[in-house]
Image: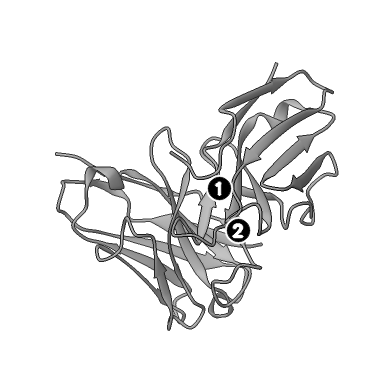
């Protein structure tokens, strides 16, 4: 059974930093691209970032480029999201999601998601 | 404001058939597959429909998807109380909005 368990969310002041983790199990982690998708309070889902299976390729939404960094440790089956220079508009539940391919491409999609971890950015 | 447009709410009584619409443009739904996800409060989003109309293993045939032009629909027949959830559509987008765009979600209430 595929399981994705996010952690690391919390309360942080504007300009602060946080690191989210996503522990994966139930599939061969190193074979699939992984993503972060977020949902702000009362809003829809927003794609944030994707990393290829090997970690060689990363992709970001314009809204987070230069502030959030995605990474992965295939030896630990763990996905990360390093969050710097946080803003109030980054407040959201952050979900990690498994992709159906080793690379981000149009013919594939997100097949499994975690339950999410809440990040609140406020003074 | 989400790139894909969904009605904020929908409702039906047990046994009824309900449909949820998802409207996009030529850069997303018009030229790419549509996906549907179900989200219950406090749980992970669950894939219901892939590639416009494909049901993953374990998804009942009460759920079906369709696409026409730049719009898509999710239909739920034989409505059950456990179908009460939020439903989201998603699609790849070829424009600067992409690569992945989502709808704002539709809250389905089973009366």
User: For mark 2, what is the residue?
Assistant: A112
Left or right: A122, with A57 as reference point = left
Residue at x 63%, y 69% (from the top left corner): A100
**If the image is split into quadrants, where does the C terminus of chain A sit?**
top left
Residue at x 37%, y 67% (from the top left corner): A80
- Where is B25 relative to A83, above or below? above
| Numbered label attached to residue A11 | none
Task: Point out residue A69 in the picture as x, y percentages from the top left corner.
Answer: 31, 68
Left or right: B40, with A21 as reference point = right
- Where is A85 relative to B38, above or below? below
Residue at x 67%, y 52% (from the top left corner): B34
Q: For residue A18, what is the image quadrant?
A: bottom left
Chain holding disc 1: B
Residue at x 74%, y 53% (from the top left corner): B52
**Nearer to us in this view, B8 or B80:** B8
User: For mark 1, what is the residue?
Assistant: B44
In whole angstroms, how far apart are the C-alphas of marks 2 and 1?
Answer: 8 Å
Q: Secondary structure at mark 2?
A: strand
**Nearer to us in this view, A28 or B27:** B27
Task: Point out residue B56 in the picture as x, y percentages from the top left corner.
Answer: 76, 56
Are marks 2 and 1 in one subunit? no
Mark 2 crowd level (few <14, some 14–19, many ≥20, 10 Å Cα):
some
- Contact between marks 2 and 1 (CB within 8 A): the answer is yes
Left or right: B33, with A53 as reference point = right
């Amino acid at each position: 059974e595929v399981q994705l368990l996010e952690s690391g969310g919390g309360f942080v002041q504007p300009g602060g930093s946080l690191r989210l983790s996503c522990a994966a199990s139930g599939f061969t982690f190193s074979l699939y691209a992984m993503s972060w998708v977020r949902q702000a309070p009362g809003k829809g889902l927003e794609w944030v970032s994707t990393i290829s299976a090997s970690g060689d390729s990363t992709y970001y939404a314009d809204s987070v480029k230069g502030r959030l960094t995605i990474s992965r440790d295939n030896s630990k089956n763990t996905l990360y999201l390093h969050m710097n220079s946080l803003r109030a508009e980054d407040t959201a539940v952050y979900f990690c999601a498994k992709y159906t391919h080793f690379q981000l491409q149009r013919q594939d999609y997100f097949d499994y998601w975690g339950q999410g971890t809440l990040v609140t950015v406020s003074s | 404001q989400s790139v894909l447009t969904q009605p904020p709410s929908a409702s039906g009584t047990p046994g009824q058939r309900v449909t949820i619409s998802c409207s996009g443009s030529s850069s997303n739904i018009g030229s790419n597959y549509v996906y549907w996800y179900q989200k219950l409060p406090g749980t992970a989003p669950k894939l219901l429909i892939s590639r416009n109309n494909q049901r993953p293993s374990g998804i009942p045939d009460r759920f079906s998807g369709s696409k026409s032009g730049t719009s898509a629909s999710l239909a739920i027949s034989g409505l059950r109380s456990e179908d009460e959830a939020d439903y989201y559509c998603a699609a790849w987008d070829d424009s600067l909005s992409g690569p992945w765009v989502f709808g704002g979600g539709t809250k389905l209430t089973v009366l």
